[in-house]
């Protein structure tokens, strides 16, 4: 059973460009969480999704950030018009119903 | 809102020795889970150990054990017989037991195991 997959592992963008981060949950997992880790910090919750639904987006900035988890395909975290402060590691975690979360390897976003 | 505090930014331990990492948390809820995650230089988040708040018995996983003090809201991690591969950031995390809820993480403790 493959683990949580994230791609790309590293992403470099210039200020003002768009960043798209993908997360494929473990087989059988229908719950996806996105977290952001700034340098020398712990992970901070951004958004929680189930298939085709955003359940909790209380940790996600209102501007420029969006997330989706379509019926088919991976979950996508999209950051429009990136700024230097968006540079961070973005982690996705998946879980089956009411259980612990399994993390992907993360995507390190660098904004030049 | 729940908070998790790790008061030791950095620690070091000699190989084969024992080290204890501290974690305190704040919540008004009664049912929850606590976790310790390890993040080595590869940045992969690896679950080390979990504790259900309703269980009085402390969780153990091989060389890793916890001291869970519910009344004091304390959840420390003990690593016995430390190995060089234990060098990593360690994060304490909290999760409510009310369906799928997000993890709340502490800021982490950087552990260095010295040969």
Image (tube, coloured by chain):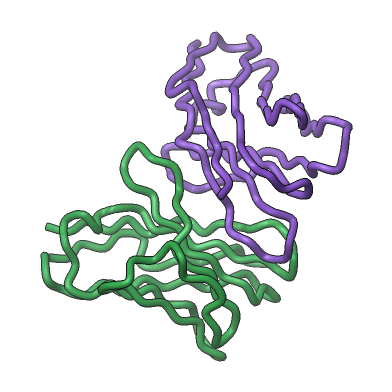
* A101 lies left or right of A77: right
In this orientation, which residue lies closer to the viewer: B65 or A55? Answer: A55
Q: Position of residue B37 (x, y in %)?
A: 59, 40
Compare residues B15 and A80 and report the one nearer the observer. Answer: A80
The hue of chain A in the figure is green
Quick one: which residue is furthest to the bottom in this view? A71
Tell me which residue sits at (56%, 27%) in the image: B86
Q: Is residue B14 above or below residue A96?
A: above
- A60 left or right, relative to A73: left
Q: Is residue B110 left or right of residue A27?
A: left
- Number of numbered discs on residues: 0
Please tell me which residue is depicted at 59% across the width and 45% down the height of the picture. B46
Q: Position of residue B7 (x, y in %)?
A: 49, 23
Q: Position of residue B55 (x, y in %)?
A: 87, 39
On screen, A69 above or below A43? below
Above or below, A71 against B68 in this view is: below
> x%, y% of residue B58?
82, 30
Q: Which of B114/B31 is in front?
A: B31
Residue found at x 63% / y 9%: B17
Q: Which chain did the renderer colour purple?
A: B
Residue at image location 56% in from the left, 70% down from the top:
A32
Q: Is residue A84 above or below residue A52?
A: above
To which quarter of the image does residue A19 belong? Answer: bottom left
Q: From this viewpoint, which residue is outermost toward the front?
A: B28
């Amino acid at each position: 059973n493959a683990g949580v997959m994230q791609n790309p592992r590293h992403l470099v963008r210039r200020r003002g460009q768009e960043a798209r981060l993908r997360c494929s949950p473990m087989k059988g997992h229908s719950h996806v969480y996105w977290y952001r880790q700034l340098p020398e910090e712990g992970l901070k919750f951004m958004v929680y999704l189930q298939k085709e639904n955003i359940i909790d987006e209380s940790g996600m900035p209102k501007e420029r950030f969006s997330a989706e988890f379509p019926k088919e395909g991976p979950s996508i975290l999209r950051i429009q018009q990136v700024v230097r402060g968006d540079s961070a590691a973005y982690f996705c975690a998946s879980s089956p119903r009411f259980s612990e979360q399994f993390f992907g390897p993360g995507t390190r976003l660098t904004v030049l | 809102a729940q908070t998790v505090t790790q008061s030791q930014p950095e620690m070091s331990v000699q190989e084969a020795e024992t080290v204890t990492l501290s974690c305190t948390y704040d919540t008004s809820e009664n049912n929850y889970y606590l976790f310790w995650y390890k993040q080595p230089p590869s940045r992969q988040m690896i679950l080390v150990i979990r504790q259900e708040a309703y269980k009085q018995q402390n969780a153990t996983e091989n060389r890793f054990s916890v001291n869970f003090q519910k009344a004091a809201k304390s959840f420390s991690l003990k690593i016995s017989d430390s190995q060089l591969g234990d060098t990593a950031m360690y994060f304490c995390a909290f999760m409510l037991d009310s369906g799928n809820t997000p993890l709340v993480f502490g800021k982490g403790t950087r552990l260095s195991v010295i040969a």
